[in-house]
Image (cartoon, rainbow, N blue to C red):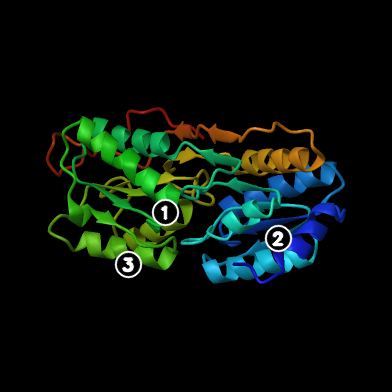
Amino acid sequence: KLNYHPNLLASNFRRQKTHTIGLIIPDVTNPFFTTIARGVEDQARKKQFKVFVCSTDEDADIEKEYIDDLIQRRVEGFVIAPSTGGGKYLFDLQDDKIKFVVVDREVKNLKADIVHSDNVDGAYRLTNYLIKLGHRRIAIINGAMQTSVAIQRFTGYEKALLESNVPIVDALVKGNDWRMESSYKHTMELLTSKFSPTAIFAANNILGVGVLRALRETGLKVPTDMSVVCFDDVPVASLMYPFLTVVVQSPYTMGKLATQILLEKRSGQGLTERQDIVLKPNFIIRESCRPLRNSGETHILSGMEDKQQK
């Protein structure tokens, strides 16, 4: 439970007009979440609201502390991207009829308004693209499987492999958190494994940076020695060479829509039923993947046949 007296404080919370809202995100260093924050702030500013931005560092206990603190500050609602293993405190908010909208990550059994991406479809398209190029040893470096996005991205990866009768090899499935250092370590493990992949799917931008760092340090070239795809644009991915093939989410739109829903419901103007808004990610083919000669392990040394998109 949250550290406040629910009846009195929640009652005051609902009546108070401070023209402030709380935004809780798991990682302020991740450009994806800072772009969500920009969307939240821009939409809030249009309605003369200010935003308290809090970063939990993927820690559920810190998430709880911020929720408690912002309630005491009488914010008029929340936009929340739950931390790894977090979100359980949102049930308390719902019980006390405090307005909030979830963004990016779902919380199991929580019937709340949410704006998020079609993670299954995005991961499926990336994996299927690699399969069509002839890859069979496709590794995935995923994030924390306590989060809905990691589960959904693995589901998309798995779906593409199963549809093409490509075996799912446990040794090619890596990941336990969303940190670059972990991704770097997992990539190094893959490169020294007897199941060394021909392609790597990084499940978000920060993990993608770890993959690229490991490949660079070992002298492997993308895509000559390893094909790489990423869920989310790695920072400056469209400016670096080779240009990375990615699916791109719409974090700014997520932030704006979540804030719009929150403020409309706060004013009594929004839809009364639960809103579940799913945004389709964009698939962008660049130059980080090569086709294989056959179903074996050898890369074609000629250039990409797919048209580069910037």
Discs 1/2, front: 2
Q: In the image, what residue occupies the spot 30% across and 50% down? A: 140
Please name the residue that numbered disc 3 is placed on: 185
Question: Dot 1 surroundings within 10 Å: few (below 14), some, or many (20 or more)?
Answer: many
Quarter of the picture containing the N terminus is bottom right
Q: Would you place residue 202 above or below residue 190 in this image?
A: above
What residue is disc 1 on? 208
Against 125, residue 204 (above or below) is: below
Mark found first going from the N terminus, 1 or 2: 2
Q: Nearer the viewer, mark 3 or mark 2?
A: 2
- Secondary structure at badge 3 equals helix
Q: CA gap, disc 1 to disc 3?
A: 12 Å
Residue 267 x/y as whole percent: 81, 40
Crowdedness of circle 2 by 10 Å Cα count: few (<14), some, many (20+)?
Answer: some
Q: Residues within 10 Å of mark 3 (few under 14, many from 20)?
A: some
The disc labelled 1 sits on which kind of residue?
Answer: Gly
Locate residue 177 relative to residue 253 in the image: left or right: left
Q: Quarter-wise, where is residue 52 in the image?
A: bottom right
On residue 118, which mark appears?
A: none
**Cα separation between marks 3 and 2:** 31 Å
Q: Which residue is mark 2?
A: 53
Q: Horizontal and vertical percent for residue 226?
A: 27, 49
Disc 1 element = helix
Q: Kindly identify the residue that appears in the image at 64 percent across and 70 percent down.
A: 65
Residue 69, x across and y down, in percent: 72, 69
Specify whether 232 is left or right of 94.
left
Percent across and percent down for residue 192 are 19, 63
Give SS at disc 2.
strand
